[in-house]
Amino acid sequence: MKMLVVFVILLHVSQHTFTVEVYEGAESVLLSCQISSVPLGPTVIWSRFDLSPSTVHQRNQRGEILRDQNQRYRDRTSVKTDALRTGDLSLTLRKPRLSDSGTYTCSIRPVGEEPRLTNVQLQVKEPYTFPTEATVLLVLLGLVAVVVVGLAVYFWFYVIRVSKVVVEVEEGAESVLLPYTTIACLPRDATVEWRCCEPKPMTVHVHQDGRDRPDKQDEFYQNRTQMKKNPLRTGDLSLTLTDPSYLDRGTYVCSVRRHKHILIQKVVQLQVTVQQVEVKVEGGVESVQLPCQSRVHLPEDVTVVWKFCQSKTTTIHVNHNGCDQRDQQHEFYRDRTEMNEDLLRTGDFSLTLKHPTDSDTGRYTCTVLMDKHFPMKKEVKLRVKVQQVEVEEGLESVQLPFRTTGDLPQDVRVKWFNRDNGRTVHVYENGSDRPGEQNQVYRDRTEMNEDLLRPGDLSLTLKHPKVTDTGRYSCEVIAREWYLVRKKTVQLKVKERTQVKDETVDIRNRRSSTDPTPLMADQSV
């Protein structure tokens, strides 16, 4: 009977997957996977989703990645070193065993794109001698006409069929459905298991013995998953996942097993899009809040990291288990950031940024790192408008405002300069002004507070503003180690003084007069 079984499997599975047969004891077997063109920054992953961990072999452009490999394949797998250049992603499996039989998934994951999947069904058979084979063949030839129909029906229900679907949802939605319906007649004693295979393997939901088994699912998914009643009878194996977040993105596999054999299987790729938040404020405000909330129940061991991502990434705030880690933040943000004290209870990881300036404009990321779980990440775009100051020429003075946190280091250097022409406007260092460093255009025309570092008032007074003073003025606070501590830009516009028209009556030219009284007659003789 064994040879007929193999024959029928080949006929059916070939519609969905490649099938490879090999005898146990062979030197090796090749599982073929080819692509016509190699995408940018690819990673090839060979997986068996009925195992945990599911990774059989993994390689990227830097080399093999074997830290998550299932131990039963240790030192027995290889992919060509030039695979990601030639597109030949085939896997060589040495010394195949009976337990190696199963469905192998070859996925190529380009940067920023969904994985491309190819399935290979490997069947490792017991070696047998020719007399045994001949006997089996004779018996099968006599019975094939009787049993072929029955076997075809049998394998329609029990052969492994793997399909894949992509589901997209926006973070913040109430729930998302991972769909899976089948017309196969499933046995009532089968087990339905949903697993998340990447980026981190976890058990999502288990239905066994006619009921859900929350004791078998990972804590991260507890009270967040639901299946309809009697899934094995109705064939609706879909899973509802509530409060989907960035953490839930990844590849989900639903497997129906009976006595350790997979009957049917489906792959669902869940893509969770993060709604981009944009915050706009006027220059000169006291503070601004960068929002970041999580609706998912989080464990106690949580680290929240806020970063500023421009030409280079800067850490601006770190909080571990409710305690701020000030030693890990950049000096530019020292004493300017604040988070809620009860963030672990509320799930509100929003950041308050004090005294924002135009230099704070850019992209910020909030990353929540949890023990044994992959990170949650949200993005906020902040735009701080350059503060505008507008005066009229002829005034006694104008102030370019810059107020920040107090108690700045005493050894800092404060410098105001004109961004449009590069001229130095004013320098303060070591407790005193440095008039020798300023441009002569501003000589004896600038002034700053005497005790400016303690209150954090770095405003500049410019005396007798002129139209030619119009431009962008920046103030930089630089520490002794020559790193930037604070920075702000102010746009100054000096308008020409309004001239009052002379409306004196000229009797010699009536048209120039604004007096409507008629001219008196000339009384001279």
Image (cartoon, grey):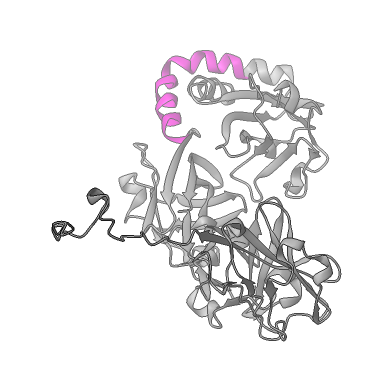
Residue 164 drawn at (x, y percent): 48, 36
Q: Residue at coordinates 62% horizontally, 53% vertically from top-left?
A: 200
Q: Considering depth in this image, is 50 or 391 the residue closer to the camera?
A: 391
Which of the 4 quarters of the picture holds residue 485? Answer: bottom right
Residue 151 among those drawn in magenta: yes
Q: Residue furthest right?
A: 481
Residue at 43% in and 45% down: 168
The quadrant the C terminus occupies is bottom left
Q: Position of residue 222 (x, y in %)?
A: 48, 66
Q: Residue 82, relative to residue 181: is it above or below?
A: above
Q: Position of residue 377 (x, y in %)?
A: 57, 58
- Above or below, 315 against 53 in this view is below
Q: Which residues are magenta?
A: 136-158
Q: Position of residue 312 (x, y in %)?
A: 72, 53
Assign the N terminus to one quadrant of the image. top right
Residue drawn at (63%, 35%) of the image: 110
In the picture, residue 56 is in which quadrant?
top right
Position of 477 compared to 375: left or right?
right
Image position of 257 (left or right of 314): left
Give the camera-side residue of 460 and 293: 460
Residue 72 is a magenta residue: no
Q: Of 231 and 337, which appears nearest the observer?
A: 337
Name, please, the residue furthest toward the front: 525
The majority secondary structure of the magenta stretch comes to helix
